[in-house]
Image (spheres, rainbow, N blue to C red):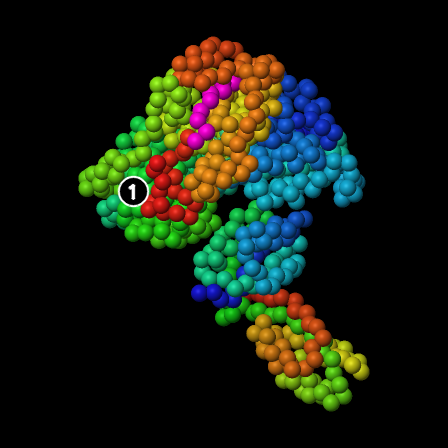
Amino acid sequence: MKKMRVLSILVKNNAGTLTRVAGLFARRGYNIDTLTVSATKDHRFSKITLTAELDDIMLGQLMSQTAKLQEVVSIEELFDHNSVLREILLVKVAVTHECRSKLIEIANVYKGVVVDLSRESMIIELTGKPQKIDAFINVIDNFNIVNFCRTGVTAVQRG
Amino acid sequence: MKLTGAEIIIKTLLDEGVDTIFGYPGGTVIDIYNALYDYQDQIRHIRPSHEQGGVHAADGYARSTGKTGVCIATSGPGATNTITGIATAFMDSIPLVCITGNVASHLIGKDAFQEIDIYGVTMSVTKHNFMVSDVAELQDTIRNAFSIANSGRKAPVLIDIQKNVMQSMYEYEPKPSLPLAENPEFEKSEIEKLADYINKADKPIIYAGGGINSSNASTELRELMNKANIPAVNTIMTIGVLGPLDQLNLGMVGMHGKNSSNLAIENSDLVIALGTRFSDRVALNTNHFAPDAKIIQVDIDASEMNKNVIVDYAVVGDVKEVLTELLPLIDANKRQAWLEQIAELQKDDYQAPCCDKQIKPHQLISYVVNQLGEDLIVVTDVGQHQMWTAQCCARTKPRTFLTSGGLGTMGFGFGAAIGAKVGNPDKPVVLFTGDGSFTMNMNELKTAVDFNVKTTTIILNNHTLGMVRQWQNLLYNKRFSQTDINHSFDYVKLAEAFGAKGYSCKTVDEFKAAFADSQKQDGPVIIEVLIDQDELVLPMIPAGGTVEDIIME
Ligand SMILES: Cc1ncc(C[n+]2csc(CCOP(=O)(O)OP(=O)(O)O)c2C)c(N)n1
Ligand SMILES: [Mg+2]
């Protein structure tokens, strides 16, 4: 059964490493939903965090194929219960005088912050688990969303 | 001692035990050649007619000797010409180190003359590749490339070196070779579980792949078969690992394998897959592969588990190491009923036709291999002739049958045969090729003549791209689109033009005479044999089919 997986890949910080990982996914037909790359404490390594809808067999394939790349140091699956998963959303909504306060009210419930405000539009920033971001976008769906950007999931294991 | 980058390359290669290089000069590798000039007595350099042929030669050298094949090409077209060769080796897990030159660092990314991003281009056909822009990294990178190519599942590695790196001076202090990466570890309990599956099986069958070759595990494989009377089938990559002398070897499995081999898999209750990848030419229909059997698998590459076929139990490890641990846990067992059942199946196997006058492919191939004995290295190209050769070349030693299995590269043969002969000067090397495949890379005949590489090339000339024609014949209503080759090529003159000896034969007697004479020649020889255009490779299970769909006549 397919479900949303979060994978954390520690890679050597060499030119071309991201191309290798991305190229592998493209050529093996793995569909990736989000992918983020970030520096780590040790500048020789970077962390790739990705999410994808996979069943167990596909997960095994993706993990073992990725682990074969020379520049991959380790790959592990992260779970909601043992990791902190976060994503940032920036959403720009066209607003009229009437609906502006309503939108701010909803954003407040989700602990979103208004980071830009003009006569015609506003931008809300929201940080949270991917599910929370999904829920927020869902709730404001009947507003006039101009566009939005999500960073993709970043994650760190608890404890 | 300070050396140029180019000298460091040669020194490091020598240190790594390299004595043979297949390469082609050009502007960005001219410094390597300049350095090589001083080491001609220590390194044999073979220059092919085309870089593709050079890589196939390095590949044939590696396949036949077990060593790493080394090749050199210049930037741009030289580098792109290597790709088919590298991909061929990659698909069959053959260790190569390919060195390409590139334009100088300050020109990188400027679309300079003969600049190609070969690093980007070869990422998906190498296990790893490097781009070297600093002479300080040169020695380590080359040593690393050898280690990666030979660790775990073997494969080609490419090193792209910028021209100024070869010209820069750097301190050369020879370092030791890098050790190979450790093979994956496995637990005793995993081996016990494998043993349990095997000991409980009534009708087990070993499905042995090229991994047996890579890990030199043929002795252990035989012990397992003999101790517990477990029959085996081989893939095209395991010809020679298992041979006709192995009583328990049923022969080749898959699309053009023996009917009995495919039926044995179908009827088994346990498939023991060793160093093999359930390719679509063997597990033609993954949903019906060994329908009643449990499947257990041993492979050094974890990503082969559950890739094409879902298995019941798998151990990741070097197949030789696993078999060594496994053998003491295996119960002796007569398995009489199962072996009798198989013997029954074998009675209905396809028998290739023979003829006194007209040349029949099987008969011809059998004749040649009988004449030249068990040390003969048989090389093929791709097509019907490849399958006929695979079916009857009767190799009994590992590394004596070289073929492009995974990529199916027409044009592989001549280069590979040259590489095999260069690596095994004392063994006879025969290439069985087709009229289509031969013309793809026949320019390498010049290489064989130039370097006096004594190979025998036998062209089974059916005046057609026979394998494609066979599909058109059986599956596409005989619509022979673009397959027949109607050129009236004079192979004898062709050979002579290149400075080789050529023969052309229509009958069995003519062939026997030509072959006898050809073996007395000092240089490479070409023997054209005319065969019928409608000759088929049988049996055949069409792609995606099952044993039920087998075509026997
Ligand atoms: C480089 C390449 N191009 C095309 C093919 C597709 N192909 C497979 S077999 C074959 C025919 C080979 O003809 P020939 O070498 O004459 O061998 P025959 O089948 O006639 O024995 C072709 C075109 C291939 N395998 N490799
Ligand atoms: Mg032909």
Label 1 chain ID: B
Vertical placement of residue B365 versus B268, above or below:
above
Quarter containing the N terminus of chain A: bottom left
Say if disc 1 is inside 8 Å of ligand 1. Answer: no
Vertical placement of residue B182 versus B435, above or below:
below
* Viewer-nearest residue: B160 or B435: B435
Image location (x, y in percent) of residue B511: 43, 16
Question: Which region of the structure is painted magenta?
Answer: B524-534
Vertical placement of residue B345 versus B500, above or below:
below
Image location (x, y in percent) of residue B390: 41, 31
Left/right of residue B119 with respect to residue B229 in the rendered view? right
Whether residue A77 can be seen here: yes
Whether residue B140 can be seen here: no
Vertical placement of residue A127 versus B92, above or below:
below
Q: Is residue B513 magenta?
A: no
Residue at numbered disc 1: B264
Q: Secondary structure at mark 1?
A: helix
Image location (x, y in percent) of residue B432: 47, 25
Identify the residue at horizontal 25%, vertical 39% (top origin): B345
Identify the residue at horizontal 35%, vertical 42% (top origin): B550
Label 1 packing within 10 angstroms: few (<14), some (14-19), many (20+) = many
Identify the residue at horizontal 56%, vertical 22% (top origin): B488
* Viewer-nearest residue: A128 or B276: B276
* Viewer-nearest residue: B163 or B401: B401
**Which amino acid does the dot numbered 1 rest on?**
Ala
Q: Quadrant of residue B5?
A: top right
Image location (x, y in percent) of residue B11: 64, 27
Left/right of residue B422 with respect to residue B120 in the rendered view? left
